[in-house]
Image (tube, rainbow, N blue to C red):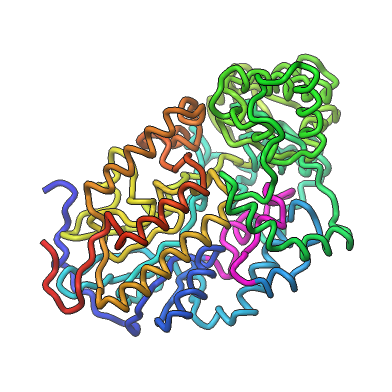
Amino acid sequence: MTGIRDACSIEDPITEPDFDVVIIGAGAAGLYALHRVRGLGLSAKVFEKGDGVGGTWYWNRYPGARCDVESWDYCYTFSEELEQEWEWTERFPTQPELERYFNHVADRFDLRRDIEFDTRVDQARFDDEQNRWIIRTSKGATVSAQYVVSAAGCLSEVNTPRFKGAETFEGQQIHTARWPKGGIDVTGMRVGVIGTGSTGIQAIPQLAKQAEHLFVFQRTPQFAIPARNTPIDDTTLEELKHNYRERWELKRASPVGMGRRPPEVSSALEVDEATRTRILEDSWALGGPGFARTFDDVMTNVDSNQLTSEFVQDKIREKVADSAVAESLLAIDHPLGARRLIVEIDYFETYNRPNVTLVDVAAAPIEEITPQGLRTTEGSFDLDLIVYATGFDGMTGALLAMDIQGVGGIALRDKWANGAGAYLGLVASGFPNLFMITGPGSPAVFSNVIFSIEQHVDWIGNCLAHMTESGFDRIDSDPEAEAEWTRQVHEIAAQSIVGKTDSWWTGANIEGKPQGVTFYLGGTHTYREICEEIAANCYRGFVFQPANSPASA
């Protein structure tokens, strides 16, 4: 039968101790999951393919890499002591600072002793008879666990386009998410950057400062908002520590999990032009990703979005000296916020440098990589280094990179062949005892993801405690509940501009991937209430099995 594998055809001798829980990944999600699972008295093992903690902030070391969420929002809230002792230095923290933060967390809570580094999970197969997961690693070990928690991340499986001739290039090629720890000295180099998403827009200004010449191969022009990044002075730091609880409450009430107060007015259409301009100017001066919520209806009302978009385009136009270059940068084919709204530092000003050339590869596509560089339909470019700022196979890529097999040997890849979905983004039917942190069907990347991570881990922890107290050892989602939740996710997406624009949010960047928004756009505050209500009502939509009972049919 297509998609079904014989789960009993391969012997799986257990070469490591059994665990209650195996956690995949030691990023923000994996570290907190380990801490929470330990608190339940369960044995746990984390497998991490890198040689350090931090996940996203371990792998993404490219020049200019920094978080586009303010540091006081992009941090754990489970420990007030941790919040009070850690001191952020900038509004938008850099990769090195974030890596230090997660290393501090790992050391403070003594997490490393249960993490195995340089180890990838290659296969996780559910053994129906044993009611356990059998996990195989890249080191040849096989372990079993009652539960598996995937903390593999929404943006960790890299996407490198298959350009003709790439294997012939005589220079160096690198994806931004695989930048070496020691960096790359591009002094005197001719550098080509392919991609102008969030990563490209961060890296381009920094590479331009060193490179002999930088060629930016722009496929999709983007809206970008100034970060207005600043150091955090002592007064601000004291205020942040003092207002810890207030910011936590604001994040809980926010539709995206940010500690920012609601907009002054709900719609750009309900005020006169002078008032609207003042509000937009104030929001622009503040900068950051919150600009997308200057008005509540920017993401749902076409007219409000148009007015906001025109304001941003005028601001960008003012930054670029060459009008032709400016218009190429502003040939944007989507509404503001339909793609990830990017936060930038000196990105547009970089095109005023004499050593930077913008190449419009939407108009003149890349034909091939040559031994000496790159050729488009309109010309050739000699390069020493090609940088792929081409992003990731989002939401499902990391999960599907592993061979995950559920009940009867059904592969997760086959279950999701026509589109991914899981009940609440947590459990996919037919894959019992497999929890997904920020999986498809959750707010995930359309939120302050670390805040969503905490909410998911807490829900999973509470669920595991409930199972132990109630004598259950198996949880699955009801297929009908999963289908209904997935329908709601798609229905809400259809009301937003997000679902109407091709992007990595819709899977359009990956050839052959089913198209559509796979995350919940109804707001993290609403999502949390739904999760809490479902748990309070005996975990409605989930199916439990008592310990030592026969496997469910």
Q: Quadrant of the C terminus?
A: bottom left
Residue 499 among magenta residues: no
Q: Residue 245 in the image: x percent, y percent?
A: 68, 62
Task: Give the image quarter of residue 495.
Answer: top left
Please report the residue visible at 14 percent of the width from the left and 69 percent of the height from the top: 551
Task: Give the image quarter of residue 436.
Answer: bottom left
| Left or right of residue 321, residue 374 in this image | left
Please report the residue visible at 63 percent of the width from the left and 18 percent of the height from the top: 306
Question: Which residues are the magenta region?
Answer: 50-79
Q: Which of 215 and 276 is in front in this view?
A: 276
Is 410 above or below relative to 488?
below
Q: Residue 265 in the image: x percent, y percent?
A: 68, 30
Residue 53 among magenta residues: yes
Please report the residue visible at 72 percent of the width from the left and 31 percent of the height from the top: 215
Q: Can residue 372 be seen in this view?
A: no
| Left or right of residue 226, residue 301 in this image | left
Q: Nearer the viewer, residue 150 or 35?
A: 35
| Left or right of residue 346, residue 269 in this image | left
| Left or right of residue 329, residue 54 in this image | left
